[in-house]
């Protein structure tokens, strides 16, 4: 069975929290009847969950002092232009 | 938080350099994380994150104080990361091997005397794999995915940071998600 192209759009609308009730209903109905799209949708959700699971890392301890040491010594009277 | 930051920015503009240290403290982890996920390499992330803060300081007079400072700062950091990605050799960061070593990644620099518990090793390997897959994304998809799923910013904020129309941001997120789905489905 070829799935309607919009189903993929609905999945992304759903993931962006921007799906209308009507589209959500259509998506649910389709997913109930189509195991390929179920898998596809599961894989999308899994990819997101994996990306979000990467542990949050922190800046090194001396980060701030190194930034401060890297700043121009004094603010010049004339603005520094890019 | 934004109120305190705004106050500090006014002090910095008046010439109080020390007030800038407090701003760096507030945002350092977020900016470092953004750079690390974009570049996939701790050393580069540190360089670029510091550079972002220094540029923001130098250009503080051009910051529109009615806007969120974080949006402006993330824009500077993201642009620096994208510049760096484009300048470097295409395959340089596909794996995060330490130069001049064989198969040594930053994770293998964890002290080896104390063996890590099995599940911790697994999780480190998993995080390593995920980071590699993020690093494989073209930079235009990588930036939106990192901003949305790691920094957890709204689509509107991402559109402001990248200076792109909301529609473009959405399309890139969709394509980024599709790419990650394919790359990560067998993980």
Image (cartoon, coloured by chain):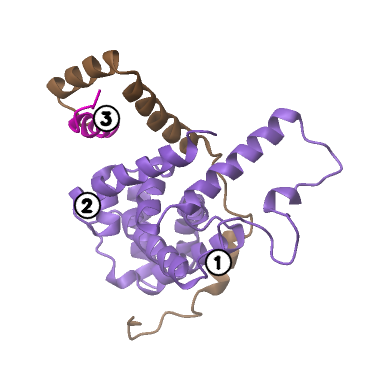
Quadrant location of the C terminus of chain B?
A: top right
Q: Secondary structure at mark 3?
A: helix
The residue under the point 31% across, 45% down is B175
Residue A49's x, y, as percent? 45, 31
Place of residue B99 in the rendered image (x, y in percent of width and height, measured from the top left): 69, 65
Percent across and percent down for residue B11 are: 38, 65
CB contact under 8 Å: marks 1 and 3:
no
Residue at 34% x, 69% y: name it: B60
- Was residue A3 drawn as part of the magenta stretch in this picture? yes
Determine the secondary structure under disc 2: helix
Where residue B47 is drawn, which disc sits there? 1
The residue most toward the front is: A1
The reply to whether dot 1 and dot 2 touch (C-beta < 8 Å) is no
- Of discs 1 and 2, which sits in the foreground? 2
Q: Residue at x 66, y 58 (%)?
A: B97
Relative to A60, is A74 above or below? below
Q: Which residues are magenta?
A: A1-16
Query: What chain is tagged by disc 1?
Result: B
Q: Judge if badges 1 and 2 mark residues of a common chain.
A: yes
Secondary structure, magenta segment, majority class: helix
Viewer-side residue, B36 vs A76: B36
Colour of chain B, in one word, is purple
Figure colour of chain A: brown
Q: Nearer the viewer, residue A78 or B157?
A: B157
Q: Which residue is mark 3?
A: A11
Name the foreground residue: B69 vs B8.
B69
Q: Secondary structure at mark 1?
A: helix
Tag 2 residue: B168
Residue farthest to the bottom?
A78
Image location of residue B43, percent across then percent down: 61, 62
């Amino acid at each position: 069975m070829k799935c309607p192209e919009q189903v993929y759009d609905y999945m992304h609308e759903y993931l962006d929290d921007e799906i209308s009730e009507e589209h959500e209903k259509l998506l649910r109905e389709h997913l109930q009847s189509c195991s390929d799209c179920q898998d596809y949708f599961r894989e999308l959700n899994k990819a997101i969950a994996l990306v979000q699971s990467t542990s949050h890392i922190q800046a090194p301890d001396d980060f701030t002092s190194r930034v401060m040491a890297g700043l121009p010594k004094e603010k010049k009277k004339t603005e520094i232009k890019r | 938080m934004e109120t305190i930051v705004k106050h500090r920015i006014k002090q910095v503009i008046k010439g109080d350099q020390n007030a800038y240290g407090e701003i760096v403290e507030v945002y350092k982890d977020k900016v470092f994380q953004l750079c690390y996920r974009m570049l996939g390499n701790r050393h580069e992330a540190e360089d670029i994150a510091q550079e972002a803060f220094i540029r923001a300081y130098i250009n503080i007079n051009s910051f529109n104080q009615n806007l969120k400072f974080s949006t402006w700062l993330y824009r500077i950091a993201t642009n620096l990361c994208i510049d760096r990605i484009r300048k470097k050799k295409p395959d340089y960061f596909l794996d995060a091997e330490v130069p001049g070593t064989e198969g040594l990644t930053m994770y293998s620099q964890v002290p080896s005397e104390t063996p890590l518990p099995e599940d911790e090793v697994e999780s480190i390997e998993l995080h390593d794999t995920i980071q590699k897959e993020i690093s494989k994304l073209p930079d235009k998809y990588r930036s939106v995915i990192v901003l949305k799923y790691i920094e957890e910013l709204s689509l509107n904020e991402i559109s402001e940071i990248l200076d792109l129309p909301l529609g473009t941001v959405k399309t890139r997120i969709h394509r980024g998600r599709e790419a990650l789905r394919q790359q990560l489905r067998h993980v």
